[in-house]
Image: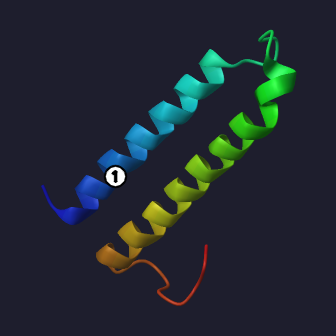
Amino acid sequence: MDDSNKLLEIKQEISQIAEKLANLFPIDHPKWNDIFEDIGAAGYYLEEANYRIEGARKTLLGDGETDSAE
């Protein structure tokens, strides 16, 4: 498995984690008001990690811009 495929695998795992968080703490969760800021931040950073990983994949494949912060 090459590096690009390994990064794709990690992206998929991160997406699964984000989905698990969303399923574990839906808006109607009894503690949603207490945790929404933290869960929202976690979701944001997971999504950002996926963008960064995709940028790295594109660079490895020769399709990415190395000087842009996606």
Pick the residue in front: 37 or 4: 37
The image quadrant that residue 56 belongs to is bottom left
The image quadrant that residue 35 belongs to is top right
Pick the residue in front: 15 or 27: 27
Q: Residue furthest front?
A: 34
Q: Where 59 falls versus 14 (above or below)?
A: below
Name the spot of residue 46 as percent of width and height, x first: 56, 48
Q: Where 48 falls versus 37 (above or below)?
A: below
Q: Residue furthest left?
A: 1
Q: Where 42 falls versus 28 (above or below)?
A: below
Pick the residue in front: 62 or 39: 39
Q: Residue at x 31, y 74 (%)?
A: 61
Q: Residue at x 80, y 9 (%)?
A: 30
Q: In this figure, which residue is indicated by the disc labeled 1?
A: 8
- The type of residue carrying mark 1 is Leu
SS at circle 1: helix
Q: Where 3 falls versus 36 (above or below)?
A: below
